[in-house]
Structures are given as structure tokens and as C-alpha cells.
Amino acid sequence: MADTILVVAEQRESKLNRVSFETIAAAQSISRETGWGVEVVLTGSGIASLAQELAQKSVARVYVLEAASLAAYTSDAYVFALKQFIQQKQPKLVLFPHTYQVRDFAPRLALALDRALVSDTIGYKYENGKLLFTRQMFQGKFAADVSFAGDAPWLATIQIGAFRGDQAVAGTAPVEHVAAAETTPRVTPHEVFQEAKQAVDLSQAEVIVAVGRGIKEQKNLALAEELAKTLGGEVAASRPICDNGWLPLERQIGSSGQTVAPKLYFALGISGAIQHIVGMKGSRTIVAVNKDPEAPIFEIADVGVVGNLFEIVPALTEEIKKTKA
Ligand code: FAD
């Protein structure tokens, strides 16, 4: 059997998580070096139409692994179905996007398969026939190359933003439906409760306007909110802003917050500490506004504006509004 990379794509409530395409891009990149084929599996119930979207990528096959017990997410049902599927297909490598859902079930799946899992990887190396994955250590201060102990299939999760979803090569793949083994999960998922419904998933935002201590006071957040609203984006922050309770924790970017990779990331009055950078450096375009020309954020910014954010941000928002008028 030819060696393959199996990408476990993610859907939730019948909506495809677009970070699945980042994982496909990672798999395609590894495939170019190793020669291993790429296949995708999507798990759930009544999800055939979502598979069509995945099939528009250059992969050998998209499997739709369906069972009634997979309709609502539970780690029990996912581990049960995927374990059997992986044992049957015997891929060399199984890749997942490093989402909350994957964090919940992938370690259990690895244990059920008795195989190694390397989590939250930011890159890979293929050297002398050996596949290594790179992970950040000590809050992003160091990066380490990690190899798998034991036999394939090997499992790895890919950090959000480490690869670009729009660089997944397009193609046409056949879709194959597979009836997954049914199981009775030990937990019964109830309706997603209100708090989570309101919670913002910044990993899905295309534009993020993030503020740091340079914003000075809570009432000044209105400046960032106005810019975000004008661009159809979301507001986020560095840790001190969330520690102050000025924004909820779910909007914190960084090693102890969210990892994001929007198309456009504004860093307003953020110095660029490593713990912040690790959460946003995968953003496509980074615009930093800081009054200190030596601020480390400028080292990774695509556009750097040295100046007072209280002058620059309102003027920028007005200019953008004019272009829209
Ligand atoms: P500061 O470093 O104080 O920077 C403020 C910036 O605003 C300065 O560069 C200043 O020049 C600029 N400024 C001031 N006034 C203006 C103005 N009028 N106009 C323009 N610019 C102005 N941090 C995170 O963000 N996310 C994390 O997840 C995170 N996790 C952490 C985990 C651990 C274990 C530890 C130890 C720390 C963590 N931190 C995290 C904290 C991190 O080390 C920094 O302290 C924090 O990111 C600094 O936030 P800041 O850039 O908003 O503030």
C-alpha cells in the first residue's frame, strides 16, 4: 500500500472550519518532499455537501465518515470512529488542525491507537528520510524539532496560522462515503449554551484590531472598536488589557491566549513581547502603530507606523470610511 497522509478536517454544526485548509496545505507541502499521497477525512452526520468543498483541493480522495452517533461532537464517538478508520487505512501520518475540538479528542485517539502524537506544531523538516516536526517550547522562547517514537501511523496537530489555507493547491478529488462504526457515547451533548454562543472565535476572523497597554484607558477601546467595525473585523488585545478586565479573556492573543492568523492584524500600542508574538505572527499582513521606534513589534510588522495611536487610528478610520462612502 502506498504511503499516505490523512488530514482530519473539522466541521462543527455542519460548518466547515476553514483551518482545515491550512492542514491540507501542510499535508500537500509534506507530500511534495516525501512523495506520500494526501487524503482527507471529514467526520459527522449529514455532511456530504461539506465534503464537496474539501474535494476542490488537490488530494487523492475525500472520505466522509458518517454515523448517527457522530451528529453532535463527543470525543467518545470521534475516537471510536476514527480509530477504526485509521486502523483500516493505515496512513503513514495523520494531521489535524490544532483546534479546541482536536485538543479534546486527539490525545485520546493517539492513546487508543497506541501511537505517538506531536501537538501544536509550527513546521516540519524531512531530513534523510526522517520526518521531524517543530514545536515551540517555554512560551515560545525556544523551538524544538521532535521526531516520532514507534511505528506509524504518526499523529500531529498543526498550529493555526502555521500554514496558509489559501495556499492549499486546488484540484478535484473523488468523494467516498464510509459508514462509521456506531457507538453509544458515555456523554450526551446538550445544546451549546449561551455563553459559548456569544463567544467570539478569533481564529475565524479575517481582520483583527488588537490593542495593548498603549491604549491607556478602557474608554479608549472605542477607537479600536470603531476601526474594527469599519473593516468588518474583531477587537483583540494583549494580556494586560484582558488582565485589567477591559476585554474578556477570549480576546487575548498570545501564548496564554488565542493563536490567530487573520489576513490583516493591527497591533496598536503593543510592544511585541514574545508571548504576544507567538499568537499572531502567522497573520498575513501585520500593521503596527507604536510611538517607540525601537518597539520589537516592528521586527515582524509588514507596515510600521511610528507615532501616537490617538492621532493615527481616528485618522485612519476616517480615511477608510471615505473609501467606502
Ligand atoms: P507594553 O509592553 O507595556 O507595551 C505598550 C506599548 O505601547 C509600548 O511599546 C509603547 O511604546 C506603546 N505606546 C504607549 N503609548 C502609545 C501611544 N500613545 N501610541 C502608540 N503606542 C504607544 N502577553 C500577551 O499579549 N499575550 C499572552 O498570551 C501572554 N502570555 C504571557 C504568559 C506568561 C507566562 C508571561 C510571563 C507573560 C505573558 N504575556 C502575554 C505578557 C507579555 O510578556 C507582555 O508583558 C505583554 O504582551 C505586554 O503587553 P503590551 O504590549 O500591551 O504592553
Image (cartoon, grey):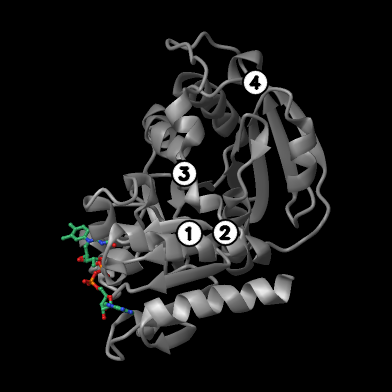
- Determine the residue positioned at 31% across, 85% down: 291
Locate the C terminus by quadrant.
bottom right
- In-front residue for pair 298/166: 298
| Distance from Cα at disc 2 to Cα at disc 3 | 26 Å
- Left or right: residue 258 versus residue 320 is left
| Distance from Cα at disc 4 to Cα at disc 3 | 22 Å
| Distance from Cα at disc 4 to Cα at disc 1 | 45 Å
SS for callout 2: helix
> Local crowd at mark 2 within 10 Å, few (<14), some, or many (≥20)?
some
> Local crowd at mark 4 within 10 Å, few (<14), some, or many (≥20)?
many
* Number of the front mark, 2 or 3: 2
* Percent x, y of residue 195: 43, 29
**Residue tagged 2:** 229
Question: Residue 225 has which mark?
Answer: 1
At label 2, the amino acid type is: Lys
Q: Are marks 4 and 3 in contact (CB under 8 Å)?
A: no
At label 3, the amino acid type is: Thr
Q: Is mark 1 within 8 Å of ligand 1?
A: no
- Left or right: residue 242 versus residue 208 is left
Q: Is mark 2 within 8 Å of ligand 1?
A: no
* Mark found first going from the N terminus, 4 or 1: 4
